[in-house]
Image (cartoon, grey):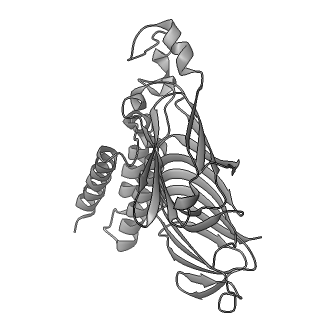
C-alpha cells in the first residue's frame, strides 16, 4: 500500500471517528481549535518528504508515527473550550466582539459568572440492600468528591452553561442514578465554558460508578466509600482517583484517548493491572511485571482484599501507586 493512501486513510478515519463520537454526544469537539494548529499538517508533509524519499519501511513508520502523535494532539486540543482569540485568528479580536446568541451586554456578564444549582436524592434504608449505580456523563466539567452526606447523593453544581439533571430509577437489583449534562448548544459559545460539580455520597451505599467524560477532570477520594466498580470512558481528561479496602473486590476500568490518569490503591490490598496502552506512558511503582501488559503487587495472591485494574489508552499517562 502506498504511504500517501495510508496517510489519507488515517486522516479520514480520524475525522469520521471524531464526527461519530460527537454525534453520539460522547465528546464535545471544537473544530476551530484544530484550524489554529494548521501548521501541523505542513510538518507532517515535511516529515513525509524527508523520511520517505526512497520508499523505505523505516521512513514510512516514522511518517505514520508523527501523524498519529499529531492527530492525538489535535484530538486533545479539539476538546478544550476555545477562547475568543481562537476564532478567525488574533487579528480580528481587536475589531469584532462576536456573540452568536444575542448582542445583550447583560448576557455577557452572565456568561462569566457561575450559577449555583443543587441536585439531590434522599437515602432510603429499604433500598440500601441493593447496589447503587451512579452514571455520570458530560464534557468540559471538573468533578470533585466533597465528602459524605446523609442523603444518598448531593451534587452542588457551579455552572456557566448547560442543563444538568439527576434522575433516579429503581429496579429489582439496583438503584440507578443518572447525572448528566446536555450542552449541545452552549458548545458553540465563546469564552470560558467550564462547569464545576462537587459530589457528596452516602458511605452506607454500595457504589458502582460509571463515568463518560468527553473532556474535563475528575478528582475522587473513595478511600472511605464502598466502591465495587469504577469505570471511566474519557477523551481528553485528567483523572485522579483513590480507592479504599472496604470491599473484598474492586474493579477499575479506564479507557481513555489522551488523558493523565493517576490511581492510588491501599498497600494492604492485592492489586493486578492489565494494560493495553499503545503509545501511553506507564508508571506502576510497587508492582512486579509478570508478562507483557500484566503487573501485580507481591501480596496479590495472599491478600483477602483485591483490586483489579484494566487500563486501555491511546496516548495517555497512567500512574498507579500504593499508599
Q: Which residue is pictured at 68% across the width and 84% down the height?
A: 297
Taking the image as shown, residue 251 lies to the left or right of residue 13, namely right
Q: Position of residue 165 (x, y in %)?
A: 46, 39
Residue 168 seen in render: yes
Taking the image as shown, residue 7 lies to the left or right of residue 307, namely left
90 relative to 74, above or below: above
> How many discs appear?
0
Residue 213 seen in render: no
Q: Which residue is pictured at 40% across the width and 33% down the height?
A: 32
Q: Position of residue 100 (x, y in %)?
A: 38, 17
Q: Farthest residue toward the right?
A: 323
Q: Which residue is pictured at 54% across the width and 60% down the height?
A: 126
Residue in the foreground of this view, choosing between 224 and 127:
127
Q: Position of residue 90 (x, y in %)?
A: 50, 22
Specify the quadrant of the image occupied by residue 103.
Answer: top left
Q: Quadrant of the C terminus?
A: bottom right
Q: Quadrant of the N terminus?
A: bottom left
Residue in the foreground of this view, choosing between 289 and 152:
152
Amino acid at each position: 500500500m502506498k504511504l500517501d493512501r495510508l496517510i489519507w486513510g488515517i486522516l479520514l478515519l480520524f475525522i469520521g471517528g471524531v464526527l461519530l463520537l460527537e454525534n453520539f454526544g460522547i465528546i464535545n469537539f471544537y473544530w476551530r481549535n484544530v484550524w489554529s494548529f494548521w501548521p501541523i499538517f505542513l510538518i507532517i508533509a515535511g516529515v513525509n518528504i524527508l523520511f520517505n524519499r526512497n520508499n523505505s519501511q523505516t521512513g514510512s513508520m516514522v511518517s505514520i508515527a508523527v501523524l498519529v502523535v499529531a492527530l492525538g494532539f489535535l484530538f486533545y486540543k479539539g476538546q478544550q473550550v476555545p477562547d475568543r482569540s481562537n476564532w478567525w485568528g488574533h487579528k480580528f479580536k481587536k475589531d469584532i466582539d462576536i456573540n452568536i446568541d444575542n448582542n445583550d451586554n447583560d448576557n455577557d456578564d452572565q456568561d462569566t459568572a457561575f450559577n449555583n444549582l443543587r441536585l439531590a436524592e434522599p437515602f432510603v434504608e429499604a433500598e440500601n440492600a441493593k447496589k447503587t449505580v451512579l452514571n455520570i456523563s458530560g464534557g468540559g466539567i471538573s468533578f470533585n468528591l466533597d465528602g459524605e452526606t446523609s442523603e444518598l447523593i448531593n451534587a452542588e453544581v457551579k455552572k456557566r452553561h448547560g442543563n444538568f439533571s439527576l434522575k433516579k430509577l429503581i429496579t429489582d437489583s439496583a438503584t440507578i442514578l443518572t447525572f448528566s449534562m446536555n450542552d449541545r448548544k452552549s458548545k458553540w459559545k465563546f469564552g470560558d465554558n467550564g462547569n464545576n460539580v462537587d459530589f457528596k455520597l452516602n458511605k452506607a451505599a454500595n457504589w458502582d460508578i460509571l463515568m463518560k467524560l468527553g473532556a474535563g477532570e475528575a478528582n475522587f477520594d473513595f478511600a472511605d466509600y464502598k466502591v465495587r466498580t469504577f469505570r471511566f470512558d474519557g477523551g481528553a481528561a485528567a483523572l485522579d482517583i483513590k480507592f479504599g479496602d472496604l470491599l473484598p473486590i474492586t474493579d477499575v476500568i479506564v479507557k481513555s484517548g489522551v488523558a493523565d490518569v493517576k490511581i492510588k490503591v491501599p498497600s494492604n490490598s492485592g492489586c493486578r493491572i492489565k494494560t493495553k496502552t499503545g503509545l501511553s506512558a506507564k508508571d506502576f511503582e510497587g508492582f512486579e511485571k509478570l508478562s507483557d501488559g500484566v503487573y501485580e503487587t507481591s501480596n496479590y495472591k495472599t491478600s483477602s482484599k483485591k483490586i483489579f485494574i484494566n487500563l486501555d489508552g491511546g496516548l495517555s499517562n497512567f500512574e498507579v501507586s500504593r499508599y
